[in-house]
Amino acid sequence: MRARYAAPLGIAALGAATLAYAAGFEVRSFRLRRVTVPVLPPGMRPLRILQVSDIHMVGGQRKKQRWLQSLAALRPDLVINTGDNLSDPEAVPETLDALGPLLEFPGAYVFGSNDYYAPKLRNPGRYLVERVQGRHGLNGNAPAVGVPRNPWWELRDAFDEAGWVNLTNTRGRVKTAGAEIALTGLDDPHIKRDRYGEVAGGPEPGADLSLAVVHAPYLRVLDAFTADRYPLILAGHTHGGQLCVPFYGALVTNCDIDPDRVKGLSTHESAGERSYLHVSAGCGTNRYTPVRFACPPEASLLTLTPRDS
């Protein structure tokens, strides 16, 4: 009798231990990813960009708040926020408190779907089904009727007041560390709010560097930015797969990018051009799935260096 139940009990115990680790430890095990990207003109001094993404703040997440505040000690030349700051309509004050020290630095931002709309309870298995079926995101630019809105305008007003550049389907420029950086951004492709036609045409002349910024790295957006010859694209949204298989990696990306590029630095090719792509795994989760496994929460410090030629 003992032998008969030993294996099922062992599997159940392992599953419980894994869930406890994913929900109790790893989801709060914040990391800093450091990346070097050779995209600057020859002879230009390196620039350091801090990318924060997918904070998904919920009330009471004090450790996350303190960790985000501590990132100011890195003293980046530029902060890029790639969206999904909220996972609780009441968490705007805590989000701004967490980002407060970073708002002292030059910055720019785009929003993600969870900045606009509150998350809803959803079967995680649907992500696997949608991956197989090739379906991602929403059919329009709004979620189902009855889904409450998040107060995104409060974030926007605070970011704008701090001097961060709003890149919602538009362009902007930032001067920092003796360099002028041209930025082109899109609203969230995951909910079909991107309008590439409003920013098409490639980098503007006269800047030392041009960057493309978007929340969700959908292929249509990556193709457009790359064809327009942006040297570096910054995105988030994927959570790095969130629940990954050790020694294998992510199973899903929550968009149409391939799992091999679900986080970190890679490249993208389109129309004979090639861009660097950096996807942040983010530092939060949807409030209804507060677990991570083999995919710690993170921010990224990108050191941009001169290219070879």
Image (tube, rainbow, N blue to C red):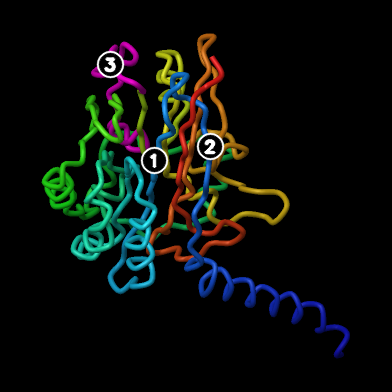
Residue type (three-letter) at the residue carrying disc 1: Ile
Q: Magenta residues?
A: 186-209
Camera-nearest label, 3 or 2: 2
Residue 215 is a magenta residue? no
Q: How far apart are marks 3 and 2 (CA)?
A: 31 Å
Residue for point 13% across, 52% down: 154
Camera sees residue 184: no
Task: Write down the quadrant of residue 169 in the picture.
Answer: top left
Q: Farthest bottom residue?
A: 1
Task: Write down the quadrant of residue 10 in the picture.
Answer: bottom right
Q: Distance between the residues labelled 2 and 1?
A: 10 Å
Residue 131 is situated, as x and y percent measured from the top left of the image, at 56, 40
Tally the numbered discs.
3
Q: Are marks 2 and 1 in contact (CB under 8 Å)?
A: no
- Callout 2: SS: strand
Residue 202 is situated, as x and y percent measured from the top left of the image, at 34, 13
Residue for point 21% across, 59% down: 96
What secondary structure characterizes most of the magenta part?
A: loop
Q: Do the residues labelled 1 and 3 touch (CB within 8 Å)?
A: no
| Nearer to me, 116 or 139 | 116
| Nearer to me, 48 or 273 | 48
Camera-nearest label, 1 or 3: 1
Residue type (three-letter) at the residue carrying disc 3: Gly
- Callout 3: SS: helix
Q: Mark 2 or mark 1: name the one nearer the start of the chain.
A: 2
